[in-house]
Amino acid sequence: MSPIASILMVAAAVPCVIGSITSRSRLSITASTVMLLAMVDLAFVSLLPPVLWSGLLLLAGLCLAMRLGSILKARAEEQAMAALPEKVLLSTNAAHSLTDSPMDGSSESSSLERPTEWQKARPFPRLGRTSAILSTAAYPIMAWQVLNHGAHHAAGSAAGAHSAHQHHGSAFDGSFVSGVITLSVIGVSLLLILCAVQALARKRPGLMLESLGMATMLTVMQFMH
């Protein structure tokens, strides 16, 4: 891997750690720290084998996915419980308005269709949840990239510099798995960049740094060898 790519890998991991610290989630801080250590070791130290770092990143992604799933399930249950009184009140008000003025429903429709702040057009109405899902999905992709990096490095050491250059020449080597990973990197990176732009507009610098850093890291590891 080129020195520029190595520096970019480590530099992109730093804002991810900063963003996880601002979220105050121990699991997110642990996962991002593992990611930073993996990038430093792969780029400069080579203390542990890439397969070990790949396993740790995959484990971190699975833990984040389990935690995110439990949080989303709990929030869905809370919203369902909170919506019950509102539905009862809405049905009561509707029945009352029909009893009072059965021929005129303009006041009711105007109150129900009145635009609110959360109805304004945004790419991701629930920015924090979207960014968390994308960041969680990035960890297994990164685990594969680290494993692929180790395989490329071993092939380059065995076959020589010329063979290594030919092997590294393209991020897409024609295999089905490589094609899926490449498309996943492009899609997830673009969505993370959109999250970073929206987070910047909403003055959430921690989320902006984390999304932008994750997108940069995935792109560098996939296309800059």
Image (spheres, grey):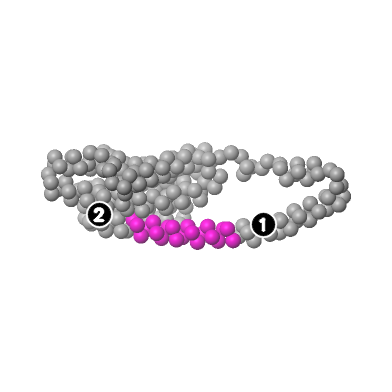
Query: CA–CA distance between discs 1 and 2?
Result: 49 Å
**Magenta part of the chain:** 57-77
Find residue 197 and report its horizontal and vertical position in percent: 47, 38
- Residue 8 magenta-highlighted: no
> What residue is pinned by disc 2?
50
Q: Residue at left 57%, top 58%?
A: 75
The residue type indicated by label 2 comes to Pro
Q: Is residue 113 visible?
A: yes
Choose between 152 and 28: the one closer to the eye. Answer: 152
- Residue 72 magenta-highlighted: yes
Instruction: Quadrant for the C terminus, please.
Output: top left
Above or below, 211 relative to 82: above
Q: Residue at left 28%, top 56%?
A: 53
Q: Residue at left 22%, top 51%?
A: 151
> What residue is pinned by disc 1?
83
Find residue 205 and report its horizontal and vertical position in percent: 47, 43
Q: Residue at left 36%, top 53%?
A: 140
Find residue 63 and report its horizontal and vertical position in percent: 41, 60
The residue type indicated by label 1 comes to Ala
Q: Could you classify mark 2 by the number of other residues whose Cα lies within 10 Å: few (under 14), some (14-19), or many (20 or more)?
A: many
State the SS at label 2: helix
Q: Is residue 36 visible?
A: no
Sequence-first tag of 1 and 2:
2
Task: Name the main secondary structure of what is drawn in magenta.
Answer: helix
Instruction: Quadrant for the N terminus, please.
Output: top left
Q: Could you classify mark 1 by the number of other residues whose Cα lies within 10 Å: few (under 14), some (14-19), or many (20 or more)?
A: few
Find residue 124 and report its horizontal and vertical position in percent: 53, 43
Choose between 213 and 52: the one closer to the eye. Answer: 52
Give the left or right position of residue 129, taking residue 179 as reference: right
